[in-house]
């Protein structure tokens, strides 16, 4: 990302589809590319089909959660790119907030 001319955008991404390399330029293509990658390295244990009983500890609930883009941008802006990351690939300094 240091070489990216615009810090406000994700650089062009490359993906391999059926042995053919494709470049992703649009935000939608980049999002799909990142999603496809995450799906390819994730797995779900389908052998557990029954969920355990859920016991409420409160009767309060959140009906709607609104997250603004600026909220996410503010958090990302505080991340230290020189800080070591944990297993979740998030820097330890950001987890201490």
Image: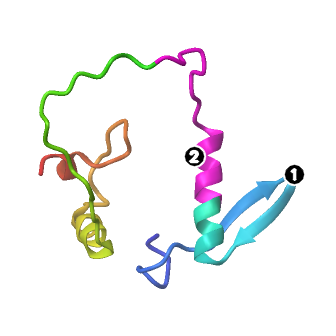
Answer yes or no: do the residues labelled 2 and 1 have beta carbons within 8 Å? no
Question: Residue 39: within the magenta?
Answer: yes
Taking the spot 44% from the left edge, 72% from the top edge, the residue there is 2
To which quarter of the image does residue 76 belong?
bottom left
Taking the spot 12% from the left edge, 51% from the top edge, the residue there is 97
Residue farthest along the bottom direction in this orientation? 5
Check disc 2: other Cα within 10 Å, few if <14, some if 14-19, many if 20+. few
Taking the spot 23% from the left edge, 22% from the top edge, the residue there is 55
Q: Is residue 5 left or right of residue 34?
A: left
Q: Is residue 1 left or right of residue 93?
A: right
Taking the spot 27% from the left edge, 65% from the top edge, the residue there is 66
Judged from the image, the secondary structure of the residue bearing numbered disc 1 is loop
Question: Residue 22: within the magenta?
Answer: no
To which quarter of the image does residue 54 belong?
top left
Residue farthest along the front direction in this orientation? 59
Which comes sooner in the sequence, label 2 or label 1? 1
Which numbered marker is on residue 18? 1
**Magenta stretch in the rendered image:** 33-50
Residue farthest along the right direction in this orientation? 19
**Nearer to the camera, 61 or 83:** 61
- Compared to residue 37, the image places residue 55 above or below, namely above
To which quarter of the image does residue 29 belong?
bottom right
- Compared to residue 37, the image places residue 43 above or below, namely above
Judged from the image, the secondary structure of the residue bearing numbered disc 2 is helix
Q: Which residue does the numbered mark 2 point to in the structure image?
A: 38
Q: Find residue 48 and report its horizontal and vertical position in percent.
A: 53, 16
Which numbered marker is on residue 69? none
Q: Find residue 81 and report its horizontal and vertical position in percent.
A: 31, 60
Q: Is residue 17 left or right of residue 12?
A: right
Q: Find residue 22 and report its horizontal and vertical position in percent.
A: 78, 66
């Amino acid at each position: 990302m240091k070489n990216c001319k615009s810090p406000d955008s994700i650089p062009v991404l490359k993906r391999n589809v059926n042995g053919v390399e494709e470049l992703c330029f649009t935000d939608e293509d980049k999002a799909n590319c990142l999603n496809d990658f995450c799906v390819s390295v994730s797995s779900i244990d389908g052998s557990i089909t029954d969920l355990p009983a859920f016991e409420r500890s409160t009767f309060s609930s959140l009906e709607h959660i609104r997250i603004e883009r600026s909220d996410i941008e503010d958090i990302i802006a505080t991340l230290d790119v020189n800080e070591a990351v944990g297993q979740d690939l998030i820097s330890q300094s950001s987890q201490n907030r």
